[in-house]
Amino acid sequence: MSNLKTVFTLLILTAFISVSKAEINIIPHPANVVTGKGNFILNDKTPVISNRKTQSEAEFLGSILVKGFGVKPEIKSAGNGIRLVLNPDLKEKLDDEGYHFKSQPDGIVIEAVSTAGIFYGIQTLRQLMPAGFEFKADQTQKVTVQEVEIWDKPRFPWRAFMLDESRNFKGVEVVKSILDQMALLKMNTFHWHLTDDQGWRIEIKKYPKLTEIGGYRKDTQKARRSDERLGVPQQGFYTQEQIKEIIRYAEERHITIVPEIEMPGHAMAAIASYPWLGTLGTTTEVPVTFGKMDDSYNVANPRVYQFLEDVLTEVFKLFPGKVIHIGGDEVNLTTWKNSPSIMAMMKKEGLNSPADLQIYFTNQISNFIDKHGRRMMGWNEILGDNIHDLPNVADTKVTEQLAKSAIIQFWKGNLDLIQKAVSEGYDVVNSYHAETYLDYNYKTIPLSKAYTFDPIPEGLPEKYDSKILGTGCQMWGEWIPTVEKMDMQVYPRLAAYAEVGWTSKSVKNYTNFLTALPNLKKRWKLLGISYTQ
Ligand code: TNX
């Protein structure tokens, strides 16, 4: 008996050693893969073994298996099948989000320190199964899962996709579909750009006009630099109930939502709703054109701070995540300079430049956010750097200092500014526009360029690596009136950015990525998701 066992073990070991890594088509590519020669046969009788703590993940897995097999798997507390095991002893090896996956002829085990890790192990299993299984497009009597052992964990803790719904509202079903794809790709942060000049998309009970007036615009610019209009209104917003539903949906997929409420610029939809919020006093309508706008919140008016705190208070109640994004980009500093009330306030507070004023304002908001146990995030203008090459240097002379708790989302400017920010102690998410903007066409950011983006800029001293939390890719919404247009921009680049965020540099390989991509494309096709070839 024991001889047999030895022979068996030896057989398995040689099987593991003899097969190359490239056989595995999983995106994002796992850290460590050893394939064997055997198979596990999964069928409609295969149970999921789970305890109460992994109940939600077991149910998620069940919801996948039922799609192909037509019956839900039994969820049991012991036995063989697909075992989901929380194992705190693996912390050193797997960190918070990693997982250990092992399929053998007698079963599958997914081990992790956290339920997030278990969830990611399940995503790996999904990708090891035929891409058409969940659509009954492949054979679904039984599924062969190859023998493989995987140790995997993400390179970065922040793996985000941003959707701008201000410029074009998309709605609950579209968001859920994106969350599904993010989950499959092990992305964990949905950055939800809910307010901007051209539309306010989140119900705020205390200020109903924000969505009544700010959630509607009568027309839309047809193309960049065009005077033509589409000739149809654009409208929509999320009720708080719908937002809760989406948050629950995201939570089941281990995705945290970071809501973005833009201030002090990109706020014309709010100003059109309550004109006293503005600086110019001339904004009466939600803009129908895009670009940098002139008006912004009048930060000299105490009522504006009260308004923003009220809005944020409702945001805190809705969103359980730690991070709240306040935008902060592209404020028209000249408008502030031309405003007597703002100039008077700057004088009173001893602020020397409009850039200093923005930092002063941002710090008030940051304090408020900190006080509520959350953490503020903003685009890198909040540091006050002159990233828009303003000719008047005095306007961006900065003496104020931004609160250190702020997370900086770097999108524009010299890459040296990243080093400056991290050396001053800030955490940074790298969303450099030229490499991560999904509104840019494929000529500007081809798939290969998206894939090779490194969130850690070249030359950054290693001691700062951990200050780069990760990366985001941004779907700005000006020119995506339809879901199809949006999907063409997002897919397949989303898969590349997922790998940028997850896969360690030593195993990243564009050729392997391209080999694995057809499986995802097959899924997208079956889901009716458009993608660029
Ligand atoms: C700049 S990126 C913006 C957005 C636009 C985008 C278009 C950023 C923080 N601001 O308002 O939608 O460019 O590419």
Image: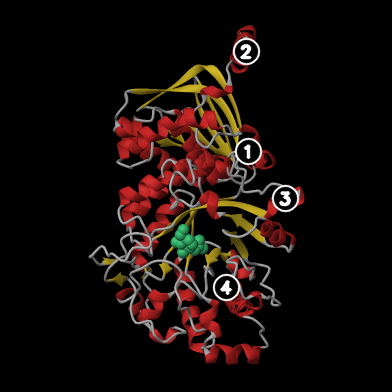
Please tell me which of labels 1 and 2 falls first in the chain: 2
Label 4 environment density (alpha carbons within 10 Å; few <14, some 14–19, many ≥20): many
Element type at mark 1: loop
Marks 3 and 4, Cα distance to the nearest angstrom?
Answer: 30 Å
Circles 4 and 1 in contact, beta carbons < 8 Å = no
Question: Residue 52: x and y, percent?
Answer: 48, 45
Front-most of residues 430 and 3? 430
Q: Which mark is residue 504?
A: 1
* Residue topped by disc 2: 14
Label 1 environment density (alpha carbons within 10 Å; few <14, some 14–19, many ≥20): some
Q: Mark 3, mark 4: which one is toward the viewer?
A: 3
* Residue topped by disc 3: 460
Please tell me which of labels 4 and 2 falls first in the chain: 2
Q: Which mark is residue 321?
A: none
Residue placed at 58% from the left, 79% from the top? 361
Q: Which mark is residue 369?
A: 4
Please tell me which of labels 3 and 4 falls first in the chain: 4
Front-most of residues 146 and 518? 518
Label 3 environment density (alpha carbons within 10 Å; few <14, some 14–19, many ≥20): some
Quadrant in the rendering for residue 346: bottom right
Q: Mark 4, mark 1: which one is toward the viewer?
A: 1
Marks 4 and 1, Cα distance to the nearest angstrom?
Answer: 33 Å
Q: Is residue 342 visible?
A: yes
Front-most of residues 209 and 375? 209
Element type at mark 2: helix
Q: Mark 3, mark 2: which one is toward the viewer?
A: 3
Marks 1 and 3, Cα distance to the nearest angstrom?
Answer: 17 Å
Element type at mark 4: helix
Question: Residue 97: x and y, percent?
Answer: 58, 45
Left or right: 93 in relation to 487: right
